[in-house]
Amino acid sequence: MLAFPFYRKLSISDGARLPNRTSVRQQQPVSYSTVPKESFVTQNAITVDIACYLKQTNNPLTMSWFNKEEGYFLYFSYGSNLDSTRIHLNNPSAVAVGKGILKDYDLAFGTLSSRKSDPLWTGGTATIVEKKGVNVWGVVWKIDLAAVSNLDRQEDVYLPKEVTIEMTDGTSLLCRTYQIDLLTVMAPMPAYKQVCIEGAREHGLPDYYIQKLMAIQDNGDTKTLTPTMVKMAEAKKDILTKDISTTHIYNSEMATELEECFHYFGYGNHLSNIHLHNKNALKVGIGKLVGYELHFGDFPASSSAKNCWKGGLASIQEKPGSVVWGVIWKMNQTDLEKLDRQVMGYRAKDVTVEKEDGGLISCRVYQLSEYIPATPSTKYKRMMVDGAVENSLPKDYISKLVAIEDNGQTGAVDATLVDSEETKKIVTNGDGVHTSKAIHQSEGYFLYFAYGSNINSKRFSVSCPTSQKVAVGCLKEFCLEFAIKEQTSGEKFVGATIESRLNASTWGVVWRVDLTELPKLDRQEHIKEKFYEPVDVSVDLENGESVICRTYRVLQPYSPFPPSVLYKSVIVIGAEEHALPAAYIETLRSLPEGPEHTVGPMKSYYLEATKN
């Protein structure tokens, strides 16, 4: 990488420093008599820069951080100049090229050792320090070449340096940036920190990096109003002195965690029932979305989205002075697509939510794309109120929710809610008492031992898509049988079952399943029709441990009945898939076969489960 001879490469981490702390404008006068005439772009500091470079290196003008022919240079910003309003105060020609990262550097805050604070801000300002394996995100700007002196004056406590920036499109750009060489670490003022955060949001820097900025400790000075703040306030028509301090200090472990997670602000039905489909969601706390108002609406007739509620759905709409309260959830990035599918008809947007402690946090939120005004159902409203009470939202906000007009519909029309209520009955045996050791209610899952067609993952995913394999297991003192049971209505059920038998063993798969899918599994096993009954069994795992699992067996009385070719194939393929003992697989293969008994949708499920 080329560099100006009088800009020695800095390494604050190993104590390197410049022998002379004078800026470009303080260098000794340069004689231009030996400098080619065409190298002069304009009569200002850029001329000095270029002249010094040519005179001291005797090299042609080839540096790629500026383009002489087109009259611009590239500048990488990572601090307050992320904000377009801030950079345009001194550099109105600046145009954002894109966002990128500076590798092997970390962000720090401070000022020159010889100063008490930055002259433009009461506190430290951003700088970069070399740190292997860490990246600094920022924005590359294209600025008129003649304006480099303006930028130099703004960055008076810094020294310029050249850096290679990796852009998000995969390209690399050589850019001019600035670094404090003799750094005294110092916390920034809240207003400076907020400008950096707003700039990061404006240009779409990653959520985890914005969280990193938000977690930086500031100096708490919310009273001082500097000239720069006044100019920005006039430009933005806004006040930048809001205290956005947080109680956490950023560290590398936090960065790793944030890269894998995102924050979601739930204000409607996700005040309460988020775990119905998002079992990994963790509550961060409650917060308020300032400048928005709660609305309710339904999808227009032209929309492909479906509304399972008999009434309006919650949405938000911008309105100065208004506030929407909700819950901040921390979720895995891997669950983002699933969350997006749950809110079909909504569009996602990033917002800043104010937490209870006054700190700010960047969150994903959803807003109805198109809707017609509609009052919510009584059931939907009740769910929101219950969620607000459960999460201790402010009493005046809860009163506001209670006062919302509803349409009188009280039935639970969302199938997921029916499952939710049914799950509670199953878990507590209908009398409020938790009975099964296979059900881990507080963690939202249960363990299920499959020994029939549900050992086939293709087959089982139809009923329980959240299922995750725990291990292969053995149920001792039980043997595998096949049964047919005829109801008084004439309906016949055929399936695998287990019966007690000394010295026998039934092999299968232990699955971990989301608790919300328990009703689906019960329906698959025809519990209400009294074909199967659920039982808790102790299953031995391959590692020697034993776990309590839920499984199902056919209720007596029943008649023995051989499995059909298709049903048997589903089980054998599942046994091979999970590498059950070879002798047991051979036993399955040798089972006698009976007439085909599978009809309807179940037959198509079985056929799909037997495909390679």
Image (cartoon, rainbow, N blue to C red):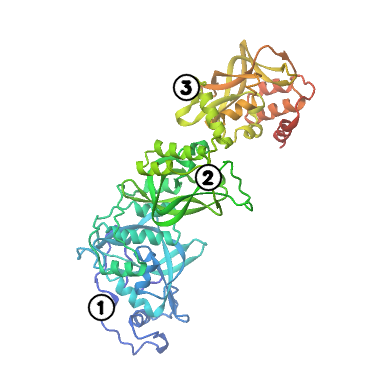
N-term mark: 3 or 2? 2
User: Between marks 3 and 2, how big is the CA–CA gap?
Assistant: 31 Å
Q: Nearer the viewer, residue 251 or 552?
A: 552
Q: Please give the name of the residue rendered at 62% of the width and 34% of the height, measured from the top-left corner.
A: 461
Task: Judge from the rendering whether residue 178 lies leftward or rightward of residue 313; answer left or right.
Answer: left
Type of amino acid under label 1: Gln
Q: Quadrant of the N terminus?
A: bottom left
N-term mark: 2 or 1? 1
**Residue underneath mark 3:** 432
The residue mark sitting in front, 3 or 1, is: 3
Type of amino acid under label 3: Gly
Residue 52 location (% of width, % of height): 34, 80
Type of amino acid under label 2: Leu
Mark 2 neighbour density, 10 Å: few (under 14) some (14–19) many (20 or more):
some
**Residue underneath mark 1:** 26
Kind of element beneath mark 1: helix
Q: Please give the name of the residue rendered at 52% of the width and 46% of the height, measured from the top-left corner.
A: 375
Kind of element beneath mark 2: helix
Within the image, what quadrant is residue 14 found in? bottom left
Q: Quadrant of the C terminus?
A: top right
User: Between marks 2 and 1, how big is the CA–CA gap?
Assistant: 57 Å
Q: Nearer the viewer, residue 189 or 403?
A: 403
Residue 525 location (% of width, % of height): 64, 24
Residue 531 location (% of width, % of height): 66, 19
248 to 50, vertically: above or below: above
Residue 181 location (% of width, % of height): 28, 65
Any part of residue 515 in sight: yes
Q: In the rendering, which numbered label is found on residue 39? A: none
**Residue underneath mark 2:** 339
